[in-house]
Image: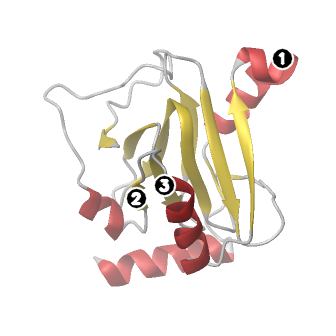
Amino acid sequence: MRAYHHDGDNTADQRLPHEYTPFSPVTPEELGRLGVLYWRIEKRDDWLEQINAVAQERSYRNRDVIKVSKEAMGDVYESKLKTFYEEHLHEDEEIRYILDGSGYFDVRDEQDRWIRIALTTGDLLVLPAGIYHRFTLDSNNYIEAMRLFKDEPKWTPINRPADSNPFRLSYLQSVRTTV
């Protein structure tokens, strides 16, 4: 995982790194203050046990696997990428373990700036309910991710603005108490 401030250029291809010059890193501790959790779980013999331990600790009961690529998604590929990249929140945590490939999650910090989180195989990311975020592939145009869910698998985005959403308000309160 590599996290840094996004350069803010929304005219260039979203799949580019969008790094400031000079580079502006964001630490796992800074992400933690936003409620974003991260684990590195190498895909070796015990990786599934490690995923299961995180799932049990956080009460994730269900999971599925998604492949995002032109080959895997066919005609809906472009529309799905566009949907994933629209700024939104969820009323549940968003949990992704990268099985293969790479991509970016962008999250908003306390000053409403984008932080780009580059993920590769072996990265496990948890975004809290109520955080504004978006996802895109990188220039490799492929990711395979395990999605974990507390209840039945669902992915319901609530596009910004959603500032009066109770999960957004709860998220903002939790961030204020950790800063």
Q: Is residue 43 above or below residue 75?
A: below
Instruction: Check if mark 3's residue and mark 2's residue have beta carbons within 8 Å.
Output: yes
Q: Is residue 48 above or below residue 173?
A: above
Report whether 126 appears left or right of 177.
right
In the rendered image, which residue does mark 2 sit on? Answer: 38
Report whether 167 appears left or right of 123.
right
The residue positioned 40% from the left and 75% from the top of the image is: 175
In the rendered image, which residue does mark 1 sit on? Answer: 74
Residue 176 appears in which quarter of the rendering? bottom left
Q: Tell me the kind of residue under disc 1.
A: Gly
112 vs 102, nearest the viewer = 102
| Element under disc 3 | strand
7 vs 146, nearest the viewer = 146
Q: Is residue 116 above or below residue 79?
A: below
The image quadrant where one finds the N terminus is top left
82 vs 105, nearest the viewer = 105
Q: CA distance from mark 1 to mark 3?
A: 26 Å
Q: Tell me the kind of residue under disc 3.
A: Leu
Q: CA distance from mark 1 to mark 2?
A: 31 Å
Can residue 167 be seen?
yes
Q: Tell me the kind of residue under disc 2.
A: Tyr
Residue 77's x, y, as percent? 77, 21
The residue lying furthest to the bottom in this view is 177
80 vs 20, nearest the viewer = 80
Instruction: Check if mark 1's residue and mark 3's residue have beta carbons within 8 Å.
Output: no
Residue 87's x, y, as percent? 60, 44
Report whether 172 appears left or right of 143.
left
| Few, some or many residues within 10 Å of mark 1 (<14, 14–19, 20+) | few
Report whether 86 appears left or right of 78.
left
Q: CA distance from mark 3 to mark 2?
A: 5 Å
Number of the label disc, if any, that sits on residue 125: 3
Residue 58's x, y, as percent? 57, 77
